[in-house]
Image (cartoon, rainbow, N blue to C red):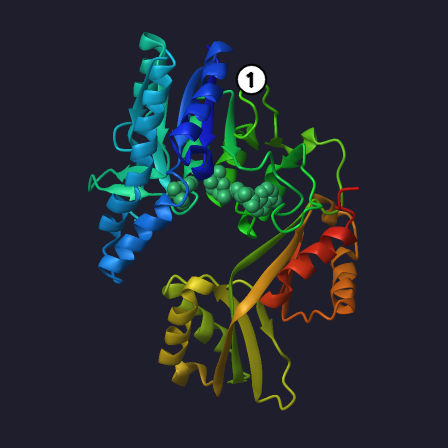
Amino acid sequence: MPRLVMKFGGTSVANVERIRNVARHVKREVEAGYDVAVVVSAMAGKTNELVGWVKEANALYDGKEYDVVVASGEQVTSGLLAIALQEMGLKARSWQGWQIPIMTSDAHGSARIADIDGSGISEGFERHKEVAVVSGFQGVHKETGRITTLGRGGSDTSAVALAAAIRAERCDIYTDVDGVYTTDPRIVPKAQRLDKVSYEEMLEMASLGAKVLQVRSVELAMMYRVPTYVRSSFDDPADPKLGTLICDEEDIMEQQVVTGIAYSRDEAQITLRNVADKPGIAASIFVPLAEANINVDMIIQVVSDDTTTTDLTFTVPSAEYERACAVLNAHKNEIEFRDLQGATDVVKVSAIGVGMRSHAGVAAKAFKALAEKGINIRAITTSEIKFSVLIDSAYTELAVRTLHSLYGLDKA
Ligand code: ADP
Ligand code: ASP
Ligand code: MG
């Protein structure tokens, strides 16, 4: 029998009534002839609550125990969904990450999946015609046997990885929107749903802030060529819509130059003033940051007037801002900067599209449009299929809407 992985996010399992609705979606697919593995998230808001409790217990918490606490949200929903399915007359059982097992690295709080043993789930399909209800987000580290979690939004990754492991025909990610839009539909009502989006573009959109899929899930979908749909759990289970297919670029007939606009508030800017302008200075700044595991994104070095000093601006994730400042101050003597200036009220707005490979002037058009709205650009980066600008966060919505209209993405 063909196999299917269905994943339901937090709002889709927010209470017992919503879980019953999920069970109806699952029943439909079982009746259509699929062996189904369902991956569930914790109920909406639950993981935030659990994280809050951990931080309240100790701000400098142990990562292993953090994972024990936050993984518990998914355990509740997997059990509840198995019960709801049984109540509808289907055979079903829950699986925790360690029971399958889903083996991961030991990077607690953001572990990576190393291997999934799909044999228990397959046996459940073949011997018992049993739906597998899998707790998303969780894994286990082989050597230590400790519970791990895959980072926020990680149930998407559990689902795609499981689909690859059990060779599912496709992976359906059910959420609270009916697909991937040209930008976040919550801030741009004129955003349009895409029927298809390429793996490459979805990867950029997710990396640049579109929270609809965890980045790692798109990487796995692309690597293992898992056809993945984003669709709504709020559709009538008897009359569902297909949503958005994430697929190979070649399978998309009509390509726009720009496919989507994303934004990320998770940025902080650091400027080092009057840094000595001599060989080795960039290394003296970025090597200590790399050693502290801090990702640097945009970098701008200003050509100096006096040829002895220069200014250097770059961005780091906002959660790493304080640590980055501490690392730089600790190396002040080697770097020889005069001042460190920082800003956390910044946002990165990006435009993504494979069409940029073959069109010139796409970014230039945006700079002009933003200037006309009086939006100052603090930093710019470009690559083959995207460009990003760093601006004051107060202008987030205006900038996203401006670019969305500029590239003809607004719904008529
Ligand atoms: P789930 O709990 O189901 O995992 P998420 O909140 O993680 O759901 O992801 C869905 C949300 O992603 C939507 O409610 C929407 O606000 C947001 N989002 C951001 N960018 C996009 C986009 N380009 N297309 C669709 N949704 C997006
Ligand atoms: N419950 C986890 C979170 O809120 C994982 C997920 O929902 O994908 O991040
Ligand atoms: Mg999510």
Residue 392 shows up from this direction: no
Q: Position of residue 237 (x, y in %)?
A: 53, 21
Location of mark 1 (residue): 238
- Indicate whether 192 appears above or below 86: below
Quarter-of-image position of residue 100: top left
- Residue at left offset 27%, top offset 62%: 59
Task: Tell me what residue is drawn at x 78 percent, y 54 percent.
Answer: 406
Q: Is residue 279 above or below residue 124?
A: below
Q: Nearer the viewer, residue 325 or 50?
A: 50
Q: Secondary structure at mark 1?
A: loop
Q: Amino acid at mark 1?
A: Ala
Judge left or right: residue 198 versus residue 124.
right
Where residue 181 appears, x then y in whole percent?
64, 41
Q: Quadrant of the C terminus?
A: top right
Residue extending farthest left: 144
Q: Quadrant of ligand 2?
A: top left
